[in-house]
């Protein structure tokens, strides 16, 4: 059965190009109303047009449309953006923007430090060797503000919950994770834990290696 995906410019942008780069966002935000009087009429028109197009792509409604289009497309066009990864093949072919977060999952990361997983070989750079869980920057980015229920009840038989928040300093070229990004990564973590526990395939191997 054919699948029809409808939408305008935002839908096409979502499938072809992925997210707007943080550098582009910062540039147009900084240029709004600044220095335009020093530009010639043609240059001013270009900047205004680009800023209007950027504003359209940056709006919350448009970003929501982009996420919905990607999901309904069933990731048929696999761009470099954060999305849930379900299978061994999905994980082994993870986009670069997802690899750092796949490798932040504590169970996966502990096995990687024990040299039991490939860890995407040269495609992954471990910026905090030996750090796991709360001590690891990418883990904190994913879990920031996420409600967690304690595994064991208290003395009254009630299950307590907590939500940790950290002040995460971002690099110049990165954006904070949205709540939807966090959910997509957490969904991925669940699948990779299941796959690793089966001890069949290494989901972080670029060469489709098996787990011993």
Image (cartoon, rainbow, N blue to C red):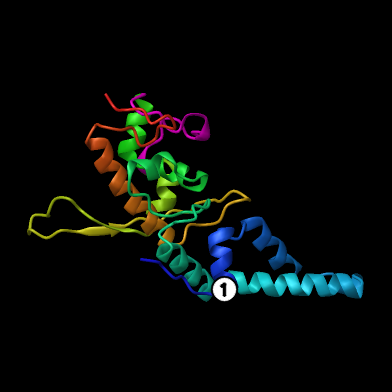
Q: Nearer the viewer, residue 110 or 207?
A: 207
Seen at 60% across and 70% down, the residue is 57
Going by the image, does 98 lie left or right of 22?
A: left
- Give left or right: position of 202 versus 94: left
Residue plotted at (44% across, 51% down): 141
Res 68 quadrant in image = bottom left
Q: Which residues are magenta?
A: 115-133
Q: Is residue 86 visible?
A: yes
In the rendered image, the vertical position of residue 194 relative to residue 70, given as above or below: above
Q: Position of residue 109 (x, y in %)?
A: 36, 35
The image shows residue 110, relative to residue 39, as above or below, that is: above
Which residue is tagged 1?
59
Q: Among all residues in the image, which is located at the extreme front?
A: 1
The quarter of the displayed image where residue 148 is located: bottom left
Q: Give the overall secondary structure of the magenta segment.
A: loop
The total number of labels drawn is 1
Quadrant of the frame with the N terminus: bottom left
Q: What residue is at 36 percent from the left and 58 percent from the top? A: 183
Q: Secondary structure at mark 1?
A: loop
**In the rendered image, which quarter contains the C terminus?**
top left
Q: Residue 170 at what x, y percent from top left?
A: 56, 51
Residue 120 within the segment the image draws in magenta: yes
Q: Residues within 10 Å of mark 1 (few under 14, many from 20)?
A: few
Asked if 205 appears above or below 10 in the picture, the reply is: above
Q: In this rendered view, identify the residue nearer to me: 186 or 136.
A: 186
Q: Position of residue 104 (x, y in %)?
A: 40, 42
Question: Which is more toward the observer, 210 or 133?
Answer: 210
| Image location of residue 36, percent across then percent down | 84, 72
Q: Is residue 69 left or right of residue 162?
A: right
Magenta highlight on residue 193: no
The residue at 43%/55% (across/down) is 83
């Amino acid at each position: 059965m054919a699948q029809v995906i409808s939408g305008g410019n935002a839908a096409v942008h979502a499938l072809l190009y992925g997210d707007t780069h943080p550098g582009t966002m910062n540039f147009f935000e900084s240029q709004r109303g600044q220095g335009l009087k020093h530009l010639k009429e043609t240059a001013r028109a270009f900047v205004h047009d680009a800023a209007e197009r950027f504003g359209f792509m940056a709006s919350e409604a448009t970003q929501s449309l982009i996420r919905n289009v990607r999901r309904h497309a069933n990731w048929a066009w696999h761009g470099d953006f954060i999305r849930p990864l379900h299978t061994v093949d999905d994980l082994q072919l993870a986009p670069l923007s997802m690899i750092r977060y796949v490798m932040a999952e504590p169970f996966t990361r502990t096995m990687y430090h024990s040299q039991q997983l490939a860890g995407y070989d040269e495609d992954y750079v471990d910026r905090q060797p030996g750090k796991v869980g709360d001590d690891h920057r990418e883990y904190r980015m994913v879990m920031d503000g996420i409600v967690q229920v304690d595994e064991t009840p208290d003395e009254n038989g009630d299950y307590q919950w907590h939500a940790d928040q950290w002040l995460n300093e971002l690099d110049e070229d990165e954006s904070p994770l949205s709540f939807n990004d966090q959910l997509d990564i957490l969904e991925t973590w669940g699948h990779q834990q299941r796959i690793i526990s089966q001890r069949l395939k290494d989901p972080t191997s670029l060469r489709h290696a098996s787990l011993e």
